[in-house]
Image: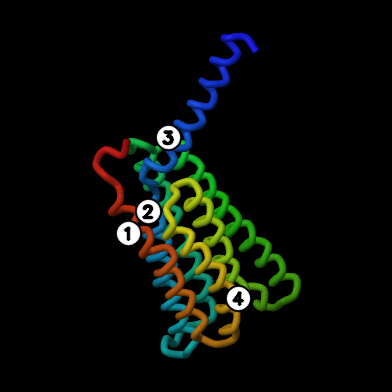
Amino acid sequence: MTRDQVQSVHDDIAYMKALAQEGRQTPLLGGRILISAGLIFGLASVVAYGIDSGILAVPPVAYAVLWGGALLAFFAILIWQIRQTDRKPGAQSVANRAAGVGWMGVGLAIFVMSLAMSVVSWKMQSDVAFMLFPSLIFALYGSGWAVSATMSDQKWQWRLAIACWIAAPLIALLTGSPLMWLGYAAGLFLFALVPGVLLVRQEPSEVI
């Protein structure tokens, strides 16, 4: 190899090391989005428990209003928070871009699967398909935390990923019981709201 080729290889290695180091040093953004998701859908789940258990006497259409309203509220907040996050220092770092894409994939998967479940429910004239929704959410959240943990090298996020995957089949055991909604709310608080608060507290005024 020529001297220029050797130097080029060294430069490439140095660049890759810099990217890896950047991923470990840059605090992850997006904690506020997780807080919003955990809070909005967690509270909606508590209300769903009230409806399902008979504590709240409302017509069946209340479910559609509840979840439709929660979804619209979250989307409105999400658009605003994404714009705010993109303006922060470090938003374009490798770690934040990769984690952002990972969580975007999680969100899109949830949305697409909800549409698929709606089609199945319409075709079968049954809401059984939606009983899998909490398990699906926790399974996908586990994937999101796995990507985030890999890019940030923060071990506690791996624990979250594993906990989400364990919770996915466990929440299925509550299918058919109003307690499923309380379990779902607890999972959203533990796997989205609380870690979102931790991520926000890690954000310095100058990220990088």
Q: Position of residue 84 (x, y in %)?
A: 34, 42
Picture residue at 39% right of the left edge, 72% below the top: 43
User: Residue 157 sits in which quadrant?
Assistant: bottom left
Judging by the rendered image, the residue that carries numbered circle 4 is: 169
Are the residues tagged 1 and 2 within 8 Å (C-beta)? yes
Q: Position of residue 42 (x, y in %)?
A: 42, 70
Q: Cα distance, mark 3 to mark 2?
A: 16 Å
Q: Could you tell which of marks 2 and 4 lies nearer the N-terminus?
A: 2
Instruction: Give the amino acid type for the residue marked by disc 2 in the picture.
Output: Gly
Instruction: Give the amino acid type for the residue marked by disc 4 in the picture.
Output: Pro
SS under mark 1 = helix
SS under mark 3 = loop
User: Residue 96 sits in which quadrant?
Assistant: top left
Q: Give neighbour class at mark 2: few <14, some 14-19, many 20+ (Cα, 10 Å).
A: many
Q: Could you tell which of marks 1 and 4 lies nearer the N-terminus?
A: 4
Q: Cα distance, mark 1 to mark 2?
A: 6 Å
Q: Could you tell which of marks 3 and 1 lies nearer the N-terminus?
A: 3
- Quarter the N terminus occupies: top right
Q: Give neighbour class at mark 4: few <14, some 14-19, many 20+ (Cα, 10 Å).
A: some
Q: Position of residue 40 (x, y in %)?
A: 40, 65
**Label of residue 85 in the image:** none
Judging by the rendered image, the residue that carries numbered circle 2 is: 31
Q: Could you tell which of marks 3 and 4 lies nearer the N-terminus?
A: 3
Judging by the rendered image, the residue that carries numbered circle 3 is: 92
Observer-nearest of 107 and 4 = 4
- Quarter the C terminus occupies: top left
Image colouring: rainbow
Picture residue at 62% right of the left edge, 9% below the top: 2
Judging by the rendered image, the residue that carries numbered circle 1 is: 197
